[in-house]
């Protein structure tokens, strides 16, 4: 831009093309019509609540009637929880609102989510209040603003401005609303929605307990952003996918014709591909090109899109791209030899290296390989090692300079395992599940070690407890006893049992009564160190199954023994003494 | 009341069943000024038992009065960590590796605490107290450095006994300050002797072949042999399930079922099954199956290096002579990686993949590249 001399003020006007060609009507929208329609349907569901009751709201009698009805419902106990009305009670919503009070539009940028929200609101007869990331979005501010906006209609109606439309709040970029805690934006929003649905609270008539009577549309890019977690179950979720290239190109073509920009379908297709279906970025690019020339050619596109979009690629997407080759381009030029930079960029923008490594690890064996199976697998493990090594250094030594190399550890996976067939990628979760289980098991070990006798504590340390003591101890405390009356027991069995009881007491192990899934009573070991002889959910084969009656017997004997010990009689080894003591206790 | 392992544990140097020359030396040392020592040797060889016997020799029966204290330490980052400490009037026993990354603060605080107070008991035979540090080879470098100066400075009040599996991870300065005492694993015959002794004390008849079998599978780990004896006895009081002609005893080639029919810890059997799976079929699908088993082992808190060594030992029993060297090489290779990295499952799987590849090539008769 060395010179700034507009030839024609009308030609170089200040509006962006994206604004100029923003769809005004529902039929103008580009993309999957089903998506648009489902969003519209949701908004229409509000009509009953927003428009039907509007004229009756002025009369106090109708409101009274409504309140009466609500009270009755509250008495019936249908709505006494703060929980939202269930599916079956959708029609029974006291205000005639749809089941989900919030619409959540999600999808990558530039597909027209905001546009859709505006078009829908207009179509359904609302005025829009937009709250976006540029506004102050602390919980408090938002609560006041949204509440005022949503409840302002009654005032304007009273003022006789019949032409005024009800408000629909559009919360743009809701995933960018940071901050956790009680007063965060999303929580406030959730509170706004759930509070109203509890009719009991409404009786309190506090200003803050007023129910939500207007639709709220939220827009986000990443549906699974952690901040949205509380919102997701309350919202109707509508996902956007990029429009097909043909649709996109024909729309671009129309716009180019209108703007007097020469462009052929091939170049526009390329533009659409580079932008990954992002209509906004296509339009911006075209407008930019228009400033310099009147024709769109490949060189022009290449030169403008150097600074590609900096969208956060999610780790799942990255993993998918590592294992799936992009569709072959028609008409030659389909060599995919520039994958290194592409992958590195993807990986870097995602930033979730650990997740990606896990995703690679969990998916690579399922990838289709025609030849050289083992060399490929071995090479892959080498790259995993590189990643692990770098990651370890990063963490332990805080050598963050190494971070630059990490993305390159993922590049070879593409070469090794990508294919054109779309394999189903599994979200990496095995490792996390294993981690959780291991932590649980470690806790069992800790509980057990804490109550171990002193002498054993000096004998077994660290991994020896798990590797040696626990598996064998499990066998030591599981002798083959028969479930007979303790008074009929044979002398040698009695000795075995006494030994068992003293061992278990010494280790502070016990059996606690519990019910299994079938409702049967069982005795479980506590602390449950028997998990260490369960592999693949099966108990060790060389051990007799524990019988309820036996454990019951042992438990009673242990209780008797404990009472005896607390009475200070010490351990008795004489069988007849035991029986006598047992009879006393029983 | 207690387990066999603990019940007949030697309490004095005279009762120790093997390594008599070592016992003799310890006795001589206890008479004079006792130095800082480092006991090292494989697991279950009797290091701890020897240490306790030596303490008894040093201080008399007072060391048997043990108590457990829970101590709280404050790390430099103001985090509280709790650690269990076993102690008597004369000694204190620490396992600093329990504190993970904070082992340095534990070592510093406890040692200073002890070093700065004198022996309270005027009747004590020695003027110093003893600090036993378990798993000294797992101490971080920081913690070991923290130890070295204290060891020199407070020799008047304090002796340190370190207990480790290997000296390789102990830093040089510490090694040079200690008297190194190696406690080797007992031989099979020695284990048999101890087993027979314990059996006699317990008044149970232990056939000789059972003792030999237990000694053999415990691989020089006396503690494990005794535990196995008790476990086996509980399940099978007459030892009738162990046949005298077991292939492990006769030395013939062992089948998979033979290796599983001896009393071993469950995880070891499971690892053995994983090894069999590796040899059974070499496909990515099978590797996936093996991965599940590896995860299962890790979930059961089995340390990853132990998994590698167990699997490779089992493989060694089963593969042909020609590729045994490769198995060992790769086991070492991947265990090295394991120790460098932080994600054990990657390297365990890589090891299994490598073995599958090597084994397949061997089966197909293709040379190695």
Image (spheres, rainbow, N blue to C red):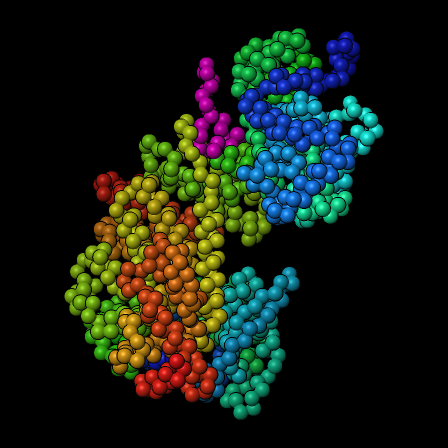
Percent of width and height locating residue A257: 63, 8
Q: From this viewpoint, which residue is outermost toward the bottom?
A: B123
Seen at 43% across and 42% down, the residue is A361
Query: Does the stretch in magenta take in A359?
Result: no
Is A186 positioned to the left or the right of B350 in the image? right
Seen at 55% across and 16% down, the residue is A247
Prevailing secondary structure of the magenta residues: loop
Percent of width and height locating residue A355: 51, 42
Q: From this viewpoint, which residue is outermost toward the right?
A: A159
How many numbered marks have been drawn onto this rendered protein structure? 0
Q: Is residue A17 above or below residue A576?
A: above
Q: Quadrant of residue B152?
A: bottom right
Query: Does the stretch in magenta take in A323?
Result: yes
Q: Nearer the viewer, residue A187 or A175?
A: A187
Percent of width and height locating residue A565: 44, 83
Is residue A149 in sight in this rendering? no
Is residue A360 in sight in this rendering? yes
Seen at 72% across and 46% down, the residue is A203
For the N terminus of chain A, give its image quadrant: top right
For the C terminus of chain A, give its image quadrant: bottom left
Q: Which residues are magenta?
A: A320-344
Q: Is residue B306 above or below residue A164?
A: below
Is B138 positioned to the left or the right of A165 in the image? left
Q: Nearer the viewer, residue A155 or B19?
A: A155
Q: Quadrant of residue B288?
A: top left
Q: Quadrant of residue A230?
A: top right
Seen at 65% across and 63% down, the residue is B78
């Amino acid at each position: 831009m060395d010179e700034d001399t507009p030839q024609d003020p009308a030609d170089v006007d200040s509006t962006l093309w994206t604004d100029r060609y923003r769809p005004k009507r529902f039929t103008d929208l580009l993309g999957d019509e089903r998506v648009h329609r489902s969003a519209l349907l949701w908004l229409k569901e509000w009509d009953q609540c927003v428009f039907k009751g509007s004229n009756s709201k002025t009369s106090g009698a109708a409101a009274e009637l409504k309140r009466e009805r609500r009270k009755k419902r509250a008495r019936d106990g249908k709505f006494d929880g703060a929980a939202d009305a269930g599916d079956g009670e959708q029609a029974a919503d006291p205000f005639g609102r749809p089941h989900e009070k919030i619409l959540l539009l999600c999808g990558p940028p530039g597909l027209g989510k905001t546009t859709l929200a505006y078009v829908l609101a207009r179509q359904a007869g609302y005025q829009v209040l937009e709250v976006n990331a540029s506004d102050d979005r602390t919980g408090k501010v938002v609560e006041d603003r949204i509440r005022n906006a949503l409840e302002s209609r009654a005032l304007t109606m009273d003022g006789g401005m019949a032409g005024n439309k009800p408000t629909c709040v559009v919360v743009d970029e809701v995933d960018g609303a940071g901050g956790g805690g009680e007063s965060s934006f999303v929580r406030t929003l959730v509170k706004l929605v759930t509070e109203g649905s509890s009719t009991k609270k409404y009786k309190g008539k506090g200003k803050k307990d007023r129910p939500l009577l207007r639709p709220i549309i939220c827009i986000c890019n990443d549906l699974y952003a952690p901040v949205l977690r509380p919102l997701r179950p309350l919202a109707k979720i509508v996902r956007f996918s990029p429009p097909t290239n043909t649709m996109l190109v024909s729309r671009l073509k129309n716009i180019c014709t209108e703007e007097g920009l020469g462009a052929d379908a091939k170049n526009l297709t390329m533009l659409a591909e580079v932008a990954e279906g992002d209509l906004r970025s296509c339009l911006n690019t075209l407008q930019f090109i228009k400033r310099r020339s009147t024709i769109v050619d490949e060189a022009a596109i290449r030169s403008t899109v150097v600074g590609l979009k900096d969208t956060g690629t999610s780790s799942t997407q990255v993993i998918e791209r590592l294992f799936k080759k992009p569709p072959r381009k028609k008409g030659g030029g389909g060599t995919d030899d520039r994958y290194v930079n592409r992958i590195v960029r993807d990986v870097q923008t995602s930033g979730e290296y650990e997740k990606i490594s896990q995703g690679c690890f969990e998916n690579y064996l399922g990838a289709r390989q025609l030849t050289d199976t083992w060399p490929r697998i071995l090479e892959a493990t080498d790259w995993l090692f590189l990643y692990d090594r770098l990651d370890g250094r990063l963490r332990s030594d805080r050598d963050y300079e190494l971070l630059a190399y990490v993305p390159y550890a993922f590049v070879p996976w593409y070469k090794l395992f990508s294919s054109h067939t779309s394999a189903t990628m599994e979200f990496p979760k095995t490792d996390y599940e294993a981690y959780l289980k291991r932590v649980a098991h470690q806790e069992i070990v800790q509980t057990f070690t804490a109550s171990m006798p002193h002498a054993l504590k000096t004998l077994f340390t660290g991994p020896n407890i798990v590797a040696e003591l626990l598996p064998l101890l499990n066998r030591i405390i599981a002798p083959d006893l028969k479930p007979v009356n303790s008074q009929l027991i044979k002398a040698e069995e009695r000795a075995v049992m006494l030994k068992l009881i003293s061992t278990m007491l010494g280790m502070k192990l016990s059996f606690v009564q519990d019910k299994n899934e079938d409702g049967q009573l069982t005795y479980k070991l506590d602390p449950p160190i028997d998990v260490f002889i369960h592999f693949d959910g099966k108990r060790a084969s060389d051990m007799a199954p524990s019988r309820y009656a036996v454990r019951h017997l042992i438990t009673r004997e242990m209780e008797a023994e404990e009472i005896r010990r607390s009475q200070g009689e010490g351990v008795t080894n004489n069988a007849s003494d035991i029986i006598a003591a047992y009879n006393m206790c029983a | 009341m207690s387990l066999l392992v603990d019940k007949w544990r030697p309490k004095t140097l005279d009762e120790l069943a093997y390594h008599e020359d070592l016992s003799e030396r310890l006795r001589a040392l206890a008479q004079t000024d006792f130095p800082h020592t480092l006991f090292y040797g494989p697991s279950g060889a009797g290091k701890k038992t020897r240490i306790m016997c030596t303490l008894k020799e040093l201080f008399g029966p007072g060391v048997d009065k043990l108590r457990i204290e829970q101590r709280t330490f404050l790390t430099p980052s103001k985090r509280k960590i709790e650690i269990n400490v076993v102690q008597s009037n004369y000694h204190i026993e620490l396992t600093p590796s329990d504190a993970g990354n904070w082992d340095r603060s534990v070592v510093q605080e406890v040692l200073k605490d002890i070093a700065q107070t004198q022996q309270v008991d005027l009747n004590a035979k020695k003027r110093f107290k003893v600090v036993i540090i378990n798993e000294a080879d797992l101490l971080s470098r920081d913690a070991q450095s923290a130890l070295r100066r204290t060891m020199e400075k407070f020799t008047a009040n304090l002796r340190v006994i370190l207990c480790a599996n290997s000296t390789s991870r102990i830093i040089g300065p510490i090694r040079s300050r200690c008297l190194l005492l190696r406690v080797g694993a007992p031989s099979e015959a020695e284990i048999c002797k101890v087993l027979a002794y314990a059996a006699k004390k317990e008044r149970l008849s232990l056939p000789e072949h059972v003792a030999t079998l237990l000694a053999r599978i415990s691989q020089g780990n006396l503690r494990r042999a005794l535990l196995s004896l008790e476990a086996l006895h509980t399940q099978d009081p007459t030892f009738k399930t162990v046949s005298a002609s077991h292939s492990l005893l006769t030395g013939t080639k062992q089948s998979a079922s033979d290796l599983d029919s001896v009393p071993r810890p469950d995880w070891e059997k499971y690892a053995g099954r994983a090894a069999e799976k590796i040899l059974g079929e070499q496909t990515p699908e099978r590797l996936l199956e093996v991965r599940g088993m590896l995860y299962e082992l890790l979930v059961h808190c089995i340390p990853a290096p132990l998994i590698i060594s167990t699997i490779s030992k089992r493989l060694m029993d089963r593969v042909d002579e020609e590729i045994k060297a490769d198995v060992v090489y790769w086991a070492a290779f991947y265990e090295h990686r394991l120790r460098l990295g932080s994600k054990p499952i990657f390297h365990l799987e890589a090891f299994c993949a490598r073995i599958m590849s090597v084994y397949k090539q061997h089966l197909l008769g293709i040379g190695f590249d």
